[in-house]
């Protein structure tokens, strides 16, 4: 089975894919090794997968995968935040998800990419060609099982998001969004963050939540006015009363 990358391959935008990683200690130093897709592998198996991967640094605003393109690459997110987006019939962008460190992007065993993937912040990826990753996964059932579990988790999140979009009002949506951000931006084993930078602009938050930018700004200002959050910077959020924010997030 041929699991070698095409060394002439380039990422979107013409950026060349770096050479395969030969540093065996990279996995040992990886910040997300215990929660990434490869977490269930033995050390020698991680080493074999590591040799198939490449470390890629992505600048904020750079698109890694384009909706509808052939599914040629997959990746673990090591650091940074990225958005998943789709185009509407009239050409507008709709953000359909946000991915964080330890999340997996791309479509293993698939032919086309369902969403565009674009960095919201500078990001680092552990990147594989899909063919190489698929071949490795077929030979390691525990990795296939992990992929299935991730798929089911994504389905659960999608169903929760349907509840948020369909049943919650604007205040509940904003509160739920901030609580989710505080959890997802925290490092493994750490409690939710009480202070963090939002990776999304207010317009992007509005797009994600099905609101207008004016509504997003008004709700954030109201939460600040009643002392539940503070807004010390342009994108900085400080949660001052988590219990009250949780109450705000729950649909009546």
Image: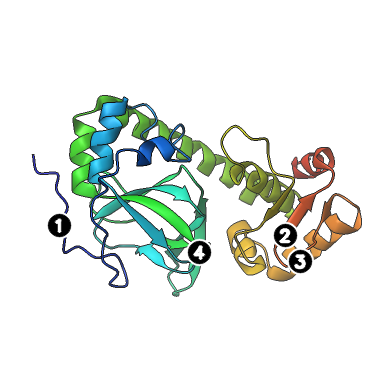
- Mark 3 or mark 2, which has the lower sequence index? 3
Determine whether label 2 and label 4 are within 8 Å by CB. Answer: no
Whole-Å distance between the Cαs marked 1 and 4? 33 Å
Question: How many numbered marks, from 0 up?
Answer: 4
Q: Residues within 10 Å of mark 1 (few under 14, many from 20)?
A: few
Q: Which residue is mark 1?
A: 6
- Mark sitting earlier along the chain (1/2): 1
Mark 4, secondary structure of its residue: strand
- The residues tagged by marks 2 and 4 sit, at their Cα atoms, a distance apart of 24 Å
Residue 193, image quadrant: top right
Q: Secondary structure at mark 1?
A: loop
Q: Helix, strand, or loop for circle 2?
A: strand
CB under 8 Å between discs 3 and 1: no
**Label 3 – label 2 distance at C-alpha:** 13 Å
Q: Along the polypeptide, which appears first: circle 1 or circle 4? A: 1
Between disc 4 and disc 3, whose residue precedes?
Answer: 4
Q: Provide the residue designation for mark 4.
A: 94
Neighbor class of circle 4 (other Cα within 10 Å; few <14, some 14-19, many 20+) is some
Between circles 3 and 2, the one closer to the viewer is 2
- The residue tagged 3 is 217
Find disc 2 in the rendering and name its residue: 236
Q: Residue at x 63, y 61 (%)?
A: 205
Residue 106 appears in the figure: no
């Amino acid at each position: 089975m041929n699991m070698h990358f095409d060394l002439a391959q380039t990422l979107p935008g013409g950026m060349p894919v770096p050479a395969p990683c030969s540093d065996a200690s990279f996995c040992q130093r990886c910040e997300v090794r215990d929660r990434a897709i490869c977490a269930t592998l033995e050390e020698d198996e991680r080493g074999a997968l590591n040799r198939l991967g490449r470390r890629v640094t992505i600048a904020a605003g750079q698109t890694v995968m384009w909706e509808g393109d052939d599914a040629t690459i997959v990746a673990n997110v090591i650091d940074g935040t990225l958005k998943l987006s789709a185009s509407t019939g009239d050409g507008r962008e709709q953000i359909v998800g946000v991915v964080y460190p330890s999340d997996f992007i791309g479509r293993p065993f698939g032919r086309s990419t369902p969403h565009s993937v674009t960095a919201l912040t500078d990001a680092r990826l552990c990147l594989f060609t899909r063919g190489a990753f698929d071949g490795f996964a077929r030979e390691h059932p525990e990795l296939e099982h992990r992929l299935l579990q991730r798929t089911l988790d994504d389905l659960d999140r999608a169903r929760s998001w349907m509840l948020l979009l369909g049943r919650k009002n604007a205040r509940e949506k904003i509160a739920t969004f901030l609580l989710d951000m505080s959890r997802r931006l925290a490092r493994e084993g750490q409690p939710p963050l009480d202070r963090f930078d939002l990776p999304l602009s207010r317009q992007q938050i509005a797009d994600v939540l099905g609101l207008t930018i004016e509504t997003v700004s008004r709700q954030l200002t109201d939460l600040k006015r009643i002392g539940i959050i503070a807004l010390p910077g342009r994108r900085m959020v400080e949660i001052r009363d988590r219990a009250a924010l949780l109450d705000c997030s729950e649909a009546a």
